[in-house]
Image (tube, rainbow, N blue to C red):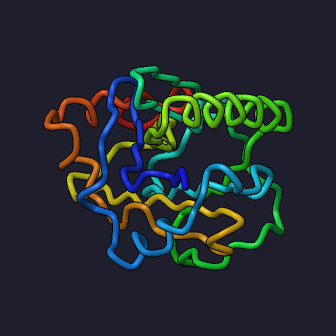
Amino acid sequence: MFAIARTPLLALTLSLAVTACGHVPLASLLKLSGVDFATTDISAIRAGIALPETLEPLADTVKLTVLAETDDGVTIRRSFMLEEAPAGEDTSGLDADENIRVYRLKEREAEDLAVVRADVLARKEKAGGGKLEISVGATACRTGALPDSPLPMSTYLKTSETGSFVPLTRDVDLRSLGGNPELVAAIPPCFAGVAGS
C-alpha cells in the first residue's frame, strides 16, 4: 500500500509553506490512513480551503503537489493545477458557517497526475518501497485591511475512499505559522484600492 502521507502542506502566501502535521485532527488521521494513492479515483479528489472573509485564494494559483521518494533515492515532485468546483458539488463534511472554496483537478491535470502516478508506482515497485506526501498550495490576497485578531484557516481533502471532506487543519491561526509574522503582513491586495493596501 502506498498511502497518502499524513502531513498536508498549505502554501498561503508567495513564500509561506507550512507543515500542518501537528494540526491534523486525530479522527482525520484514521480516515486518511485508508487513502491509497495506487487505487484512489483521481477524478474524485477534492480540496477545500476555508479562510477569513478578508482573504481569498487567487485564481490559477491553487495546486495539488505530489512528492514521492522511493527507497532507492529517487525523488519525484510534481504540481497540478486545481480549479474551483462548480456549484452543487457534494460538500458533506464541510462546515456551512465557514468561508470555504472547493477545488478539483483540471481535466488535463488529472490526466497528467494519472501518468505521474503510474511512473511513481513503477519506480516504487522497482525500488521495493517508498513514501508519498500530498499537499495543497495557494497564493492568497486580501479583500480589505486584515484585523489584528487571529486569522483562522482550515483545509480539507476528499477522496473516493473518504467519501466526504476530511479536515487536514482546523482553525489554525495564520499568524502563528511559518515563524515570521511579516509574511501575513505582506499578503497583497486582491485589487487596486483595497482598504489598507
Instruction: Look at 72% across and 34% down and name the residue there.
Output: 118
Task: Name which residue lies at 44% across and 30% down.
Answer: 69
Describe residue 173's horizontal placement relative to residue 109 as left or right: left
Residue 30, percent across and down? 43, 75
Relative vertical location of residue 75 with respect to residue 55 in this rendering, above or below: above
* Residue at the far left in the pictured view: 179
Pick the residue in front: 155 or 110: 110
Q: Is 92 situated above or below 87?
A: below
Look at 41% across and 24% down and name the residue there: 72
Where the N terminus falls, by quadrant? bottom right
User: Quick one: quadrant of the C terminus?
Assistant: top left
Tally the marks.
0
Q: Quadrant of residue 115?
A: top right
Residue at x 58%, y 36% (from the top left corner): 125
Q: Estimate the x, y position of residue 95 in percent, counting from the top left.
A: 53, 77
Given residues 5 and 54, the one toward you in this image is: 5
Toward the top, the furthest residue is: 74
Asked if 127 appears above or below 106 in the picture, the reply is above
Horizontal side of residue 25 vs 178, given as left or right:
right
* Residue nearest the viewer, comparing 136 with 180: 136
Q: Quadrant of residue 111?
A: top right
